[in-house]
Each structure stands twice: as structure tokens, then as C-alpha cells.
Image (cartoon, helix red, strand yellow):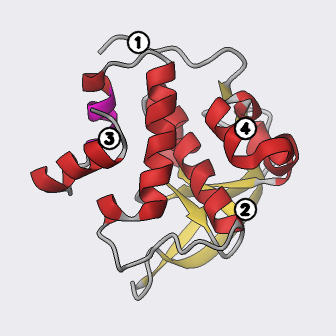
């Protein structure tokens, strides 16, 4: 895969250098009716970890004139454990796995943050991010978030193959993966 550069002005502080943080430890339900898991990490200002996202077209469309103000107030929890990134609905912050932040492909990390910002806006509007009436790949909130990250990937010049590689998740069946590609407008 060719190296895709981040847009100008986007900075990801992968090691939290110079970032003021505070520790946290909370029990979380990853999904409704799931068992709680203890998550520990550090909380920081979103813009100290992910700078420049107020210039991303899909993020600007999602939040409108309030984009810079919302991102300036948003917090990010960098946690130890499993997973990649998700919205902590109870504490109004985006959570990101420390190992993923430090070692993940930078372009995937960027696209995942665009995706999670869409979920954060949906949460602000009262949407059910875990609506179990739908399978994951058919859930309206996921479709909207994936469409935003796919649109951004296309804007950056990623090929269909590169976008499919970004969207691939080993836990999806082939049929689910095909539906995700179609629903996200990746093909």
C-alpha cells in the first residue's frame, strides 16, 4: 500500500508528548447487556492529541459553525486494554487504545477519529449508537460514520483496495463485509 499522507495541518500526538493528562479508572459496558470491564488510562484535551481536525471537511459538515468550539471542549481517554476507538457516551469523550494510538497506521488512526467524531455528533443528538435492531454493518449510525471516513479516504486519494483494507474486520463474515463496503459507499 502506498503511503498516504495526512492532510496539511493535521497532527496526531502519538506519545502524548507535552500533553497535560489526568488518570482515570472506570468500569465500562462495551455494549448493552455486556459484562463490565475495568478500563484505566489518561484523559487529555482532544485538540492536544488530535490537532487540526476542525479543518476536515466531513467534521466541519457534522458540527457546522460549532466545530472548533466542540473539539476544544472534547476530551479523549487514552486507555490500556483491547479495542481501537469508541465513544464513551457516559462521559462525553472519545476513547482510544494506547497501543493503537502509538503503533497503528497513522492514516487508519486518522480515519477512525473522523469516524468516532461522527459518532460523537450522533451521541450529542441523542442517537442510539448501539441500536441492536440492526446488525453492525446495517446500523444507521455506523453507516453514516463509515461514509464520512470513506469520503475522507477518497478525498486523500486512497484507492478502492486501500479503502477496503482499512474497512476490513476479521470478525465480519464475507457477506457482512460486502454489505459494509456497499453501505459505506466504498466500492
Q: Mark 1 points at which residue?
A: 3
Identify the residue at image location x=58%, y=62%: 87
- Judge from the rendering whether residue 60 lies leftward or rightward of residue 163; answer left or right: right
First-in-chain label (1 vs 4): 1
Q: Is residue 40 visible?
A: yes
Q: Select label 3 or label 1 by which is in front.
A: 3
Magenta stretch, overall SS: helix
Identify the residue at image location x=78%, y=40%: 47
| Real-space Cα separation, disc 3 to disc 2, in angstroms | 32 Å
Element on which disc 3 rests: helix
- Residues rendered magenta in the picture: 163-168
| Real-space Cα separation, disc 3 to disc 1, in angstroms | 17 Å
Q: Name the residue under label 4.
A: 60
Identify the residue at image location x=71%, y=71%: 91
* Quarter of the image with the N terminus in it: top left
Q: How many C-alpha atoms fall within 10 Å of the one at disc 1: few (<14), some, or many (≥20)?
A: few
The location of residue 168, given as percent across then percent down, is 26, 42
Instruction: Pick out the residue farthest to the left.
Output: 174
| Real-space Cα separation, disc 1 to disc 2, in angstroms | 34 Å
Element on which disc 4 rests: helix
First-in-chain label (3 vs 2): 2
Identify the residue at image location x=32%, y=19%: 159
Element on which disc 1 rests: loop
Find residue 173 and report its image quarter. bottom left
The location of residue 60, given as percent across then percent down, is 72, 38
Q: Select label 1 or label 4 by which is in front.
A: 4
Marks 1 and 2 close (CB-CB < 8 Å): no
Q: Name the residue under label 2.
A: 23
79 vs 147, nearest the viewer: 147
Q: Is residue 170 visible?
A: no
Amino acid at each position: 500500500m502506498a503511503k498516504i499522507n495526512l492532510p496539511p495541518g493535521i497532527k496526531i500526538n502519538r506519545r502524548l508528548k507535552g500533553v497535560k493528562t489526568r488518570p482515570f479508572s472506570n468500569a465500562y459496558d462495551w455494549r448493552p447487556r455486556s459484562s463490565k470491564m475495568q478500563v484505566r488510562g489518561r484523559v487529555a484535551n482532544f485538540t492536544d492529541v488530535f490537532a487540526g481536525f476542525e479543518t476536515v471537511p466531513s467534521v466541519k459538515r457534522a458540527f457546522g459553525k460549532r466545530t472548533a468550539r466542540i473539539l476544544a471542549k472534547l476530551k479523549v481517554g487514552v486507555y490500556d486494554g483491547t479495542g481501537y476507538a469508541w465513544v464513551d457516551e457516559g462521559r462525553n469523550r472519545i476513547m482510544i487504545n494506547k497501543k493503537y494510538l502509538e503503533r497503528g497506521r497513522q492514516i487508519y488512526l486518522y480515519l477512525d477519529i473522523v469516524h468516532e467524531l461522527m459518532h460523537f455528533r450522533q451521541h450529542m443528538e441523542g442517537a442510539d449508537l448501539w441500536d441492536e435492531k440492526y446488525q453492525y454493518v446495517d446500523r444507521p449510525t455506523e453507516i453514516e460514520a463509515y461514509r464520512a471516513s470513506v469520503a475522507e479516504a477518497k478525498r486523500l486519494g486512497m484507492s478502492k483496495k486501500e479503502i477496503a483494507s482499512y474497512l476490513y474486520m476479521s470478525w465480519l463474515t464475507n457477506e457482512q463485509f460486502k454489505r459494509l463496503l456497499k453501505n459505506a459507499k466504498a466500492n
